[in-house]
Image (spheres, rainbow, N blue to C red):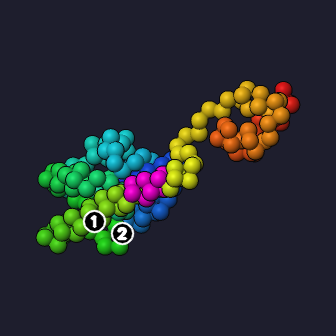
Amino acid sequence: MMTAYEYGYARVSTTAQDLKRQLDWLAAQGVPVERIYADKKTGTDFEREGLGSVLSQLRSGDVLYVASLDRLGRTMHKVLALIADLRAEGVHLVIGGAMTIDTRVGGPATDMALLMLGTFAEMELIFQRERRASARASREANGKTWGRPREIDRAAVLEDLGSGMSVMKVAAKHGIGRATVFRIKAEAKEA
């Protein structure tokens, strides 16, 4: 009989976010540090290095700890398919959060809880997309740009300033802020 091991998985969506809360939770569950895998990548992408590494380690009888279901992923059908595959291989899951789920207990209540949590994770993703779309529409309606700033034609800005156009008019013409116009003007004087 093979020895069963405990593994942990943590994920945040961006490199600016912190894994500490999840890592603390995994440590509190008794998962050894050397068997904790993590990613800083979106949950809609299932091609994640940490996730792939932990999945390749798991064997029948092992337990995978995750602080919350949405850490596995944000697409319900993919998360549920992953859980079904793991359970079919005899891997157990312990999912933390407001309602801890432990598939070692099993039964219809566990299956229902997994479905509900998966649904909530996907709903939150949908709500985030709607909030971003609403924010984009609001910015565009107010004449503001969205996304990466465009390149500024510094020569044209300096030319307009040199022709006597006011800073405010130059800023409006080029779709930039007055501070940017002043910065371009100062940089040109230094050069």
Q: Residue at x 44, y 51 (%)?
A: 13
Are circles 1 and 2 on residues that touch, CB within 8 Å?
yes
Residue 120 within the magenta-colored segment of the rendering: no
**34 w.r.t. 190: above or below:** below
Q: Residue at x 77, y 35 (%)?
A: 184
Q: Residues within 10 Å of mark 1 (few under 14, many from 20)?
A: many
- 67 lies left or right of 159: left
Part of the protein shown in magenta: 129-137
Lower position in the chain sequence, tag 1 or tag 2: 2
Q: Secondary structure at mark 1?
A: helix
Give the amino acid at mark 1.
Leu
The C terminus lies in quadrant? top right
Which of the pair 38/71 is nearer the observer? 71
- 88 lies left or right of 82: left
Quarter of the image for residue 170 reads top right
Residue at the disc numbered 1: 117
- 115 lies left or right of 173: left
Give the amino acid at mark 2.
Gly
Residue 132 within the magenta-colored segment of the rendering: yes
Which of the pair 49/36 is nearer the observer? 49
Residue 50 seen in this snapshot: yes
- The image shows residue 140 at horizontal and vertical percentages of 52, 50
| Front label number (1 vs 2) | 1
Residue at the disc numbered 2: 97
Which residue is farthest right? Answer: 189
